[in-house]
Image (tube, helix red, strand yellow):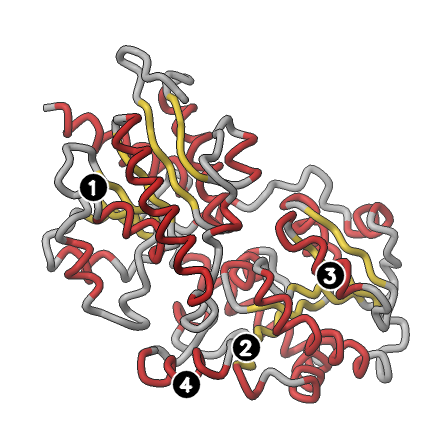
Amino acid sequence: MTEPKNNVPLLYIIAGEPSGDQLGARLMAALKEETQGNIQFIGIGGERMSAEGLESLFPISEISVMGLAEVLPHIPNILRRIKQTKEHVLETKPSALITIDAPGFSLKVSKGLKETSIPLIHYVAPSVWAWKPKRAEKISKYLDHLLTLLPFEPPYFEKHGLATTFVGHPVLEGELMTVLDRVGICKELSLDATAPILTVLPGSRRGEVARLGPVFKEAVAELVKTLPNLQCVIPTVKNVRSAIDDLADNWPTPVRVIEGVTGKHKAFKCSDVALAASGTVALELAVDHVPTVVAYKVSPVTAFLAKFLVKIKYASLANILLDREVQPELIQEKCNAPDLVKQISSLFHNKEKREEQINGYREAIVKLKAGDDMPSTKAAKTILSVIAEAKH
């Protein structure tokens, strides 16, 4: 167990899924930079946070579950892990608890620690503007500070007295490519730069890959009929690599599976079009100016309940920011091979449609900036300020 050092902050950081692990790793790097390395970390994270020096209490795959129906079989283990985590936080007595996204897990941990003197900071606001707006008031009763990614979020929480800071969206901190030459990247990935390339992203959770993978594969099989020299690249993460390898077996086109964040951005740089599960990756594709079709499908039970709970018109953040459909969205029953093929083909063949989407991306990205600091730097400065205030 990490032992606190005199006058060196010990931060307990919790990330519950791959996107949170990436966010946590960048935050840890920024905190090291701001403190000249005089900081310690403990908590729960994935491979990227581990690379920054975090020894995870348990694998984040145990709590990376999404969907109202999908989470039910995992509830007993998640409840056990919540109890274990609360006890571990109390045992380690950190300078602050920073929970990142994954509200179903992380906010339950925070709520259980509201009577302690530990500053409770949450990074990534619950989407109260999309569903369950009453959560804003509930979390304001026990959190000390909230860091938001989107510019329109703070007022939802500030009106309930929760100190909230818009830090900007981490998608702006995409991996910097040292080589931007498309031909060179294609060669590295064993792809033909003169033939059409489609990036396929069926999700970073096993449930997503299971639901979206077969539909995406069927759509590619249809696309080959009009794009016979089509190539595909499937970026993935470690926790679903085996499922992606199974999916790529007998793939209808030449396909390259690539793991890791750097590999993902290389795939984006050489792709003409992308087919992506709804989520942060759709925004990453927007930042990299890749024309994209967004698709998603959940279990019938989750879909039925969502009709009564979800309050927004769009799933894609680029579309939400602009209040119009820049990225075509094919959700639930629309997530089928014929409709996917129609939208993807349009992006491959219609230059004006691609340019219109990219112009929309530029407009959306401007809205994601919060001043001159990078999002992780602004988040780190805010966290250190909260800790300093708590000492007085």
Q: Which mark is residue 113?
A: 1
Rate crowding at label 4 as few (under 14), some (14 to 19) or many (20 or more) other CA atoms within 10 Å. Answer: few
Left or right for 157, reference 29: left
Earlier residue among tags 3 and 4: 3
The residue positioned farthest toward the top in the image shown: 6
Q: CA distance from mark 3 to mark 4?
A: 35 Å
Give whichever of discs 3 and 2 has the lower sequence position: 3
Q: Which residue is mark 3?
A: 271
Residue labelled with disc 4? 304
Whole-number angstrom distance, CA of label 1 to CA of label 2: 35 Å
Residue highlighted by disc 2: 297
**What's the residue type where badge 3 is placed?**
Ser
| Whether residue 149 can be seen here | no
Mark 2 closeness class: few <14, some 14–19, many ≥20 residues within 10 Å: many
* Residue 142 x %, y %: 16, 48
Label 3 Cα crowd, 10 Å radius (few <14 / some 14-19 / many 20+): many
Please, what is the three-letter code of the amino acid marked with disc 1? Leu
Q: Is residue 34 visible?
A: yes
Q: In front here: 344 or 365?
A: 344
Q: Earlier in the sequence, mark 4 or mark 1?
A: 1
Q: Quadrant of residue 129?
A: bottom left
Q: What amino acid is found at the position of numbered circle 4 in the picture?
A: Phe
Task: Say what amino acid the circle numbered 2 marks.
Answer: Lys
Mark 3–mark 1 contact, CB under 8 Å?
no
Is disc 2 placed on a helix, strand or loop? loop
